[in-house]
Amino acid sequence: MFGGRKAAFFVASLATLCLLSLPIWPEKETSSVELRTQEVKNTGALLGEGDRGTETPPAPVSPDPSTPKNMTLTVPKLGLKNVAVPTGFRQAELDREGVLRMKESGLPWEEGTNTFIAGHALGYSWTRVPRAFYDLEKLMPGDEVFLKSADDRTYTFEVYDRMTVEPDDTWVTYPVEGKTVVSLQTCVPIPTFENRLIVRGELVP
C-alpha cells in the first residue's frame, strides 16, 4: 500500500514538472532558422522547434557581413510595409528580428534564385516584428509581395503557390526551375507549430 502511494506521488510530481516546463502560449512561437552554408545542414534546427520556456533576450549576435543592407519587405495583405529583412542563420537572430532571410538563399535581383524568408507567427515580447507572419495563411494566389533593395529598386512577386510541409522537407529552400521566387515560411498551426507553411511568389517581369 505504502509503495503504491509513493509511486502515485512520483508520477503526479513528474507530470507537474512536465507541465511547468511548457512555454506559456502565446509568448513564443517554436520555429527556428539554423541554416545552411551551401546546402541545408541540420534541418530540424532550420525549420524545427526553438528553445522553450524563457523570456530572457538572447545574447547580442554579430551582424552578418553578407546581409543585403536595407533590403525591405512589403506585404500589403499582411499589413507589412518596408520591414527590414536582415540575413542570418541562428535561432537567436530570428527571435530578435522576427523575420530573417536565410543565409545562402537567393536574392531577388539574382535570376533563378529562391529568396527564402522565415518569420515568426508569434515571437517574444522583445522581438522586433513579433507577429510578422501571423496571418501568412491569408495570402492567396494573385496577392503581391514586394522586396526593395538598397538602391531603391522594387521587385514585385505574385503569389502562385501555397503548401504545408514537414520540418525535414529541405527542398523548399532550393531554387525552383525556370523561376525567380520568394518563399515566405512560418510554423503552423498555432499553438503546436509542428508543420511549416510555405507561400511562394514568382517575380513579375
Image: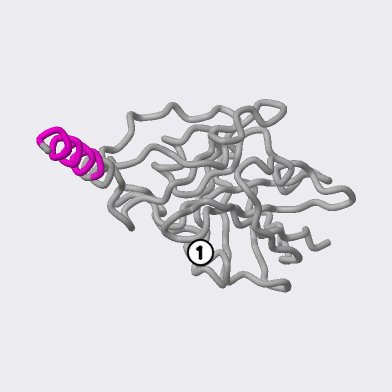
Identify which residue is drawn at 82% across, 48% down: 176
| Residue found at the very far right of the displayed protein | 178
Identify which residue is drawn at 72% across, 48% down: 108
Q: How many marks?
A: 1
On the picture, is 31 further left or further right than 20? right
Where does the N terminus fall, quadrant-wise? top left
Near-viewer residue (89 or 26)? 26
Residue type at tag 1: Leu
Mark 1 highlights which residue? 80
Q: Quadrant of residue 41?
A: top right
Residue 139: x, y in percent?
62, 69
* Secondary structure type for disc 1: strand
On the picture, is 202 further left or further right than 140? right
Where does the C terminus fall, quadrant-wise? bottom right
Residue 94: x, y in percent?
46, 42
Residue 126: x, y in percent?
30, 48
Q: Callout 1: 10 Å neighbours few (<14), some, many (20+)?
A: some
Q: Which residues are magenta?
A: 2-15
On the picture, is 118 further left or further right than 134? right
Q: Is-magenta flag for residue 9? A: yes
Identify which residue is drawn at 70% across, 43% down: 173
